[in-house]
Image (cartoon, rainbow, N blue to C red):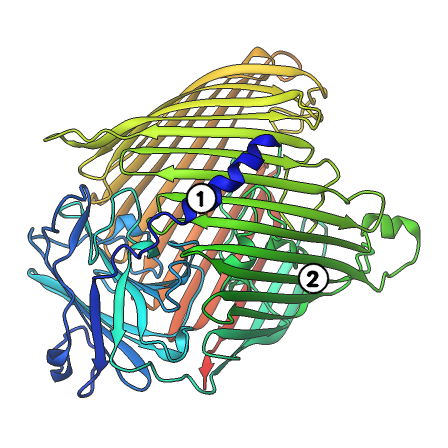
Amino acid sequence: MKKTVLLLPILFLVTGVSSQKKNDQFKLNIKQATGPIAIDGVGDDAAWSATDVAKDFFMVLPMDDGPAENTSEIRMAYDDKNIYLLAIFYNEQKGKNFVESLRRDFAFGKNDNFLLFIDSFNNQTTGFSFGSNAAGAQWDGTMFAGGRIDLNWDTKWISEVTRNDEKWVFEMALPFKSIRYEAGVTEWGINFSRLDLKSSEKSSWTPIPRQFPTSSLAYTGTLVWDKPPPPPGINYSIIPYVLSNVSEDLENNESSEYEVKAGGDVKFSLTSSLNLDLTINPDFSQVEVDRQVTNLDRFELFFPERRQFFLENSDLFANFGYDNIRPFFSRRIGLGVPIQAGARISGNLNENWRVGLLNMQTASINASGLPSQNFGVLSLQRKVFKRSNIGLMFVNKQSLNYPTENDSVQALYPKFNRNLGIEYNLASSNNLWNGKAFFLKSFGSGQKGNGVTQAANIEYNSRKWNWGFQQEWVAEDYTAEVGFVPRTGYVSFGSSAGHIFFPKKSKLVSHGPVLNVKYFFNESFKQTDRTNFLAYNFNFINRSNLFFFISDDYVELLSPFDPTRLGKEELETGTKHSWNAFGWEFNSRPQSLFTYNFSGRLGGYYLDGNRTSLSTELGYRFQPYVSLSANVNYNHINLPEPWNKSQFWLVGSELDITFTNKVFFSNLFQYNEQTGNLNVNSRFQWRYSPASDLFLVYTNNYFIEPYESRNWGITLKFTYWLNK
């Protein structure tokens, strides 16, 4: 652990580097509107002529060395209810705008678009993002970790877009009630980003180094209010739902079930920056299904949370630890069991403190003996220095009212599991340095589950150089029943380094190597795994990219493992395996109506065998109304007896129809030969009012052999967002 001890003073040392906000001199004054503003995407209201203008954007990509070629102008105003924004984007290159579809929360890199980033607490860490593509599809999300965006969050706001050969115009009204901010403050962090695919140019109102996203809150300018924004007063939302559902589980020979269900959420602003969320009898049938993957990994795979109730300020709960060491993972709640009710308090207490409190109650399942369970989470965060913070988390899972009192049920469903942890998150003011260090302790109700985990990392990311170091230790008896920790009983050390070259007058924008190494040991420091990975990246001026890699792997199995995951023979614990591999990936230019991706991997595998993996993704769009895509993954594994040769396909296709930016019809088909499942999912959504929806969802799962239905269901759901 000596390297970890050495990392800690480095984490604190680099925090204080360049403490002044980088773009503090960029200021946009916002004044109360002098007259009414109609949101029509025209921008001819007299009130706009009295506003300041943010213009003279800077180029970020392909190069960050001068002003943007495309002219952009932003104006802002407000009244007692809304913030207004007018954006005009002139086209230096004539031609149609590139858009993928009218679907909400579009893919950033595949659309001509505008994004607004609001740091309403001036902490350069959290905020809100809003925007639109050139066809009027909306984008909104919460911001966390200094520039990352969670697009699963929705709120109420309106916008319109118009366009012609010369320009496209975006106009929006954002209710004060739809966001959180600190009362009495007259300066917010703000920035504006534009992507124009015709010229392959990404630009920003403030200058941002090209290695960082335009969403980086460390590089925002300042929105200066002529007086503090109006206090929100009493602010609550009631979001009821009612649904009708019919389903049938043919796999378990169960008869058809008909269900009528009602419930809903309540959002109540305790302060202008602190929110209380309540949910009763929640339902998430409208949530998109997970994308199936080919799984040849020895450990559990991660699938992200998509349920709306868990998403606002989700970084307070979900970002503690690492991706593979999470003390709290909300998808553990309500997994195959109804959620009866839940409550959450989250937001900012003041300029320096953030808090998250979560409590959820699930029902019991008599057939399996699963008791009702209560899940409680406390997350507390204290800002230190300019952008860094110290966090505390406590997670408690408590089983209640066991259906029976026999020992077998209590052994299967322990009385409790708890986690207590503290972490330090480093974010330097210029975003060059980032890192984390944390310590977790678990508490179990039996002999097991009382363990610890500890980890630390530091990263440096400049224009030409990037490198990092990471260390992890997860004890064998550490448990996080409400978390995501797929592997325990190891110590690991990893490092990465990369360099970028910028050729002059070339179709290449940049190219360069990246080296990643990671070594795993057991707790006695005997090596069990290693991966050495060397890649070379090429980025072209038309936004296509290509990379090649070679890898060296070594594995000593810690438990029996079937290398095909097809239910065949398992390799024995303790067997040792090593191999090398070569691979590639190419992504085409996003401006084309027809887009494609090719990737592959050729090389060794367990028992001196061979594995070939080939993948492709094809897409075509009839913009902006229809988007077609298909992805194919093929794996061929050649091993000694008894496995011999194995090959399997994963095929997915998606038809996405966006009649308007409020009416969507998506269809997903997934064929997974590895799991023997064919999935069909169709979802119709009508956003008849801001944040209020009508859903019609059909899903069906089939066995591949023999071909017959496993289960199916149809759901009609109606939600309404009522504001006060």
- Residue situated in front as seen by the camera: 372 or 228: 228
Is residue 61 placed above or below 554 in the rendered structure? below
Residue 337, x across and y down, in percent: 69, 59
Query: Sequence order check: which comes first, mark 1 or mark 2?
Result: 1
Mark number, residue 25: none
Is residue 724 placed above or below 131 in the rendered structure? below
Q: Residue at x 31, y 43 (%)?
A: 619
Mark number, residue 13: 1
Is residue 609 placed above or below 70 in the rendered structure? above
In which quarter of the view is residue 102 placed? bottom left
Q: Which residue is drawn at 33% across and 52% down?
A: 107
The N terminus lies in which quarter of the figure? top right
The C terminus lies in which quarter of the figure? bottom left
Q: Decide: few, some or many residues near mark 1? Use Cα within 10 Å; few <14, some 14-19, many ≥20.
A: few
- Residue situated in front as seen by the camera: 513 or 185: 185
Residue 202 relative to residue 14: left or right? left
Secondary structure at badge 1 equals helix
Residue 694, x across and y down, in percent: 45, 72
Name the residue tied to disc 2: 375
- Residue situated in front as seen by the camera: 273 or 236: 273
Q: Decide: few, some or many residues near mark 2? Use Cα within 10 Å; few <14, some 14-19, many ≥20.
A: many
Secondary structure at badge 2 equals strand
Q: Can residue 619 be seen in this view?
A: yes
Q: Is residue 659 visible?
A: no
Is residue 697 placed above or below 585 in the rendered structure? below
Residue 364 relative to residue 607: left or right? right
Residue situated furthest right in the rendering = 406
Residue 92 relative to residue 114: left or right? left
Identify residue type, mark 2.
Phe
Identify residue type, mark 1.
Leu
Q: Which residue is drawn at 27% across and 33% down?
A: 464
